[in-house]
Amino acid sequence: FSKIEPTTTSTSTTTSTTKTKSTTTTEIPKWTMTGNMSIARRHHTATILINGFVLVTAGYNGFTHLKSAEFYNPSTDTWTTTANLSIARSYHTASILADGSVLVAGGYNGTYLNSAELYNPTSDTWTMTGSMNATREYHTVSPLEDGSVLLAGAFTNSIINQNSAELYIPSIGTWRSTGDMRYHRSGQTVSTLLSGFVLVAGGSNKIDLDSAELYSPFTSTWTPTGRMTVERYDHTASTLRNGYVLVSGGYNSKILNSAELYNPTSDTWITTGSMNAVRQYHTASTLANGKVLVTGGMGSSTALNSAELY
């Protein structure tokens, strides 16, 4: 997988009897390769656990839908297999809850799924929880400040993409509907901003989308926001320490390695350093050290087990 290194800035000053010249050079952030997963997979998920490890779950390896899971240890750059999910699935979502457990929901394994299950990192076990109100794959999910989890959009058949959204309530293990998005979309990303608002970006609805919108958990409503620099779906999005959102990879007539940043203050997008590999259906996780870990996905012709850091 890959990670991105933070930007560095250097300044030099030259002084003579007649003039002073100051030059500032900003280095574009770079991606570096790191340890490979135990198995190639795409359409999987990656979740940062409370202990700083990254839990990767399920997915598809080009031949079968997976129920396997594994941990990444950022201190050693190594992977360790862990307990299997209850149900094989790909195109699902995963999010960490306030108690440290991980909620996995929906996806596809030959059948569109509305089932959900919880991973307990302490006991290394999976248990089923309440099912969603609708079957969903290619949806997105984001934990909210009140402890609930927002799930939005989906692909449910060859014709219809959903704009519906629902909330998972951990205290009772059930789902309830909330406000619909402005656009029907699947394959989009969702990111919780430092303000508590939720950014949804890109996706597809018969055409590739560059549109983005913000969800207010305070009013349960959606409003349009600045558009990305390129249309993309099946990409990733990660909220950085500085509040920006890093979007990487995806697809828009070809598999992409490009990346861009959303500035929530100015409501604008700017390009940043490209990944080492083109990736679609990959995952991205913001680590405790501020770097972003990207894992797996679909490359030019096959599923990847490589990873890199931003």
Image (cartoon, grey):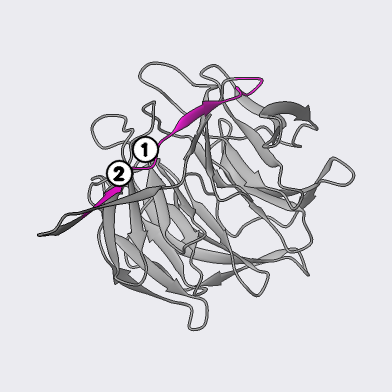
Going by the picture, which residue comes out furthest to the left? 18
Residue 230, given in percent of the width and then of the height, sits at 23, 47
Asked if the stretch drawn in magenta spans residue 256, the answer is: no
Residue 250, placed above or below residue 39: below
- Name the amino acid, label 2: Arg
Residue 279, given in percent of the width and then of the height, sits at 40, 30
Residue 134, placed above or below residue 283: below
Image depth: mark 1 or mark 2 in front: 1
Judged left or right of residue 13, residue 19 is left
Q: Quadrant of residue 64?
A: top right
Q: Quadrant of residue 252?
A: top left
Judged left or right of residue 168, residue 308 is left
Separation of residues labelled 1 and 2 (CA atoms):
8 Å
Going by the picture, which residue comes out furthest to the front? 17
Residue 149, given in percent of the width and then of the height, sits at 61, 64
Q: Residues within 10 Å of mark 2 (few under 14, many from 20)?
A: many
Check disc 2 and report the residue beneath it.
232
Q: Are marks 1 and 2 in contact (CB under 8 Å)?
A: yes
- In primary-sequence order, the first of circles 1 and 2 is 2
Q: Which mark is residue 95?
A: none
Q: Quadrant of residue 199?
A: bottom left
Q: Residues within 10 Å of mark 1 (few under 14, many from 20)?
A: many
Q: Which mark is residue 249?
A: 1
Residue 42 shows up from this direction: no
Towards the viewer: 2 or 121: 2
- Name the amino acid, label 1: Gly
Q: Which residues are magenta?
A: 22-39
Asked if the stretch drawn in magenta spans residue 23, the answer is: yes
Q: Residue at x 44, y 71 (%)?
A: 215
Q: Residue at x 33, y 40 (%)?
A: 273
